[in-house]
Amino acid sequence: MTANAGYTWVLTRVELVLSSPELDPDDVTRRLGLQPTGALRPGPRRWNPGDTSGYWGFENSERSARSLREQLDEVLSAAESCLGPLREILREGVEASVTIHGYADNDSEIVFSPTEMDRMARLGIPLVLSPSLNER
């Protein structure tokens, strides 16, 4: 994965996200054998009252891995390590994504290697790019 020189995303974080109106984060943790970096039980949200889904997330950010490539590798490796239970959970109607968050300037891009694309495709989970275009 590379980015245009001078046009890179910054303050990136990569997250495996699971959500569902009936999601039990403790059950997901037990079944996957992964400690989440964030979890919420279903119910009203103070800052987003319209979203009542349960949430389970496993995240890697610049605090733990400097490069986006390392962040993505850690999250994909974690998902691959529990792929059987993860697929069972998805068959139960839980929504999932691998989401990349970060700040992007005009014309910023992320280029994934063929190996990274293959790993993401084998997971069968959508990749979501979530750029923030705010002035920093």
Image (spheres, helix red, strand yellow):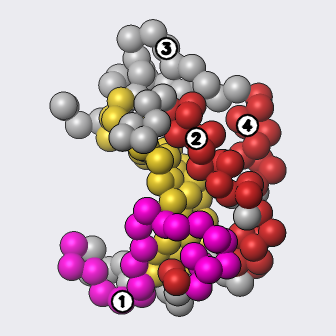
Sequence-first tag of 1 and 3:
3
Whether residue 31 is in magenta: the answer is yes
Report whether residue 102 is seen.
no
Residue named by callout 2: 72
* Mark 1: amino acid: Gly
Sequence-first tag of 3 and 2:
3
Horizontal and vertical percent position of residue 59: 47, 54
Residue named by callout 1: 43
Cα gap from disc 4 to disc 2, whole angstroms: 11 Å
* Circle 4: element type: helix
* Circle 1: element type: loop
Left or right: 127 in relation to 62: right
- Nearer to me, 46 or 39: 39
* Circle 2: element type: helix
Sequence-first tag of 4 and 1:
1
Sequence-first tag of 4 and 2:
2
Horizontal and vertical percent position of residue 48: 27, 74
Left or right: 117 in relation to 111: right
Cα gap from disc 3 to disc 4, whole angstroms: 18 Å
- Please name the residue shown 59% across and 49% down the image: 75
- Please name the residue shown 66% across and 48% down the image: 76
- Range of magenta residues: 27-47
* Circle 3: element type: loop
- Nearer to me, 21 or 86: 86
Mark 4: few/some/many CA within 10 Å (<14, 14-19, 20+): few
* Mark 4: amino acid: Met
Position of the N terminus by quadrant: top right
Residue named by callout 3: 4
Q: Is residue 61 above or below residue 19?
A: above
Residue named by callout 4: 117
